[in-house]
Amino acid sequence: METEMKIAVLGTGMVGQTIAVRLSSLGHDVHMGTRDPAETAGRREPGPWGQPSFADWLEAHPEITLESFEAAAHHGEIVLNCTAGGKSLEALRAAGADKLAGKVIVDIANPLDSSRGMPPVLSVSNTDSLGEQIQRAFPAARVVKTLNTMNCNIMVDPSRIPGVHHVFLSGNDAEAKRQVRALLESFGWQHIIDLGDITTARGPEQVLPLWIRLWGVLGNADFNFAVVHG
Ligand SMILES: NC(=O)c1ccc[n+]([C@@H]2O[C@H](COP(=O)([O-])OP(=O)(O)OC[C@H]3O[C@@H](n4cnc5c(N)ncnc54)[C@H](OP(=O)(O)O)[C@@H]3O)[C@@H](O)[C@H]2O)c1
């Protein structure tokens, strides 16, 4: 992005952490949102993939402010949704429709449902998407779906993958997509495909079953989709 901004990162998992650190390193003022800041700050168990505990991570990143979803959304001129997809509407409701009104919501979440075991299934698909659900629930916000089709380390550093590979954009508001495109470019993205309005989020969300199977076959998450056309 052109200038340093106040940014809300809603979500404390590996995506929220990775995105928050990257945005902060680019000079942005990042506030991270969670349900219960005191409880979250006290989490001492290692992350799901053996990463440091959240408490250790937060101590290592004093530049990032942890607060409630609502306080973080109030701070942010732009809001990134990095919450569990099945709970994103709940998290955004906690952030508050009034705090989100007029703002760009960058929706990175995937509506994965693991309640019936692995691999997870999509809790919304085909004729709807999480991106559309969020846009309908918060009509005064401008939702842009992006970055959900790759691992978070690639989101913030596409040069991890050699050659040409792609990230998608979906959203109804051209100016919001311009801002998100600039954010992606600041992360290093060169190949960005604007799919169209928010209904086009269905496609990028529905590649997740393929992404999950590729992860199993390839043995790690260092891969991305490339669109080759004539
Ligand atoms: N992992 C990746 O590389 C990757 C790649 C692409 C897309 N994604 C998507 O990015 C999102 C974040 O993934 P992640 O692995 O970092 O974290 P995650 O475990 O999927 O989500 C953690 C976040 O969800 C919030 N949350 C959980 N239950 C909630 C509830 N009932 N109400 C409100 N908030 C709730 C948690 O809040 P607390 O902070 O209060 O615990 C936490 O902030 C997911 O939608 C995922 O599908 C992940």
Image: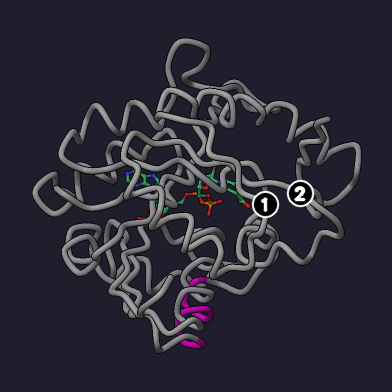
> Along the horizontal axis of the image, is 224 left or right of 51?
right
Name the residue at 75% across, 28% down.
210
> Along the horizontal axis of the image, is 36 left or right of 171?
left
- Position of the N terminus, as image quadrant, is bottom left
* The magenta segment: 54-60
Q: What colouring style does the render use? A: one colour
Name the residue at 42% across, 48% down.
83
- CA neighbours of label 1 inside 10 A, class few (<14), some (14 to 19), many (20+): some
Residue 185, quarter of the rendered image: bottom right
Q: Which mark is residue 191?
A: 1
- CA neighbours of label 2 inside 10 A, class few (<14), some (14 to 19), many (20+): some
SS of the residue under disc 1 = loop
- Seen from the viewer's position, the closer of residues 13 and 230 is 230
- Position of the C terminus, as image quadrant, is top right
Contact between marks 2 and 1 (CB within 8 A): the answer is yes
Q: Position of residue 151 (x, y in %)?
A: 67, 52
> Along the horizontal axis of the image, is 113 left or right of 215?
left
Height in image: 82 above or below 183? above
Does the magenta-highlighted stretch encompass residue 59? Answer: yes
Name the residue at 52% across, 78% down.
57
Height in image: 38 above or below 138? below
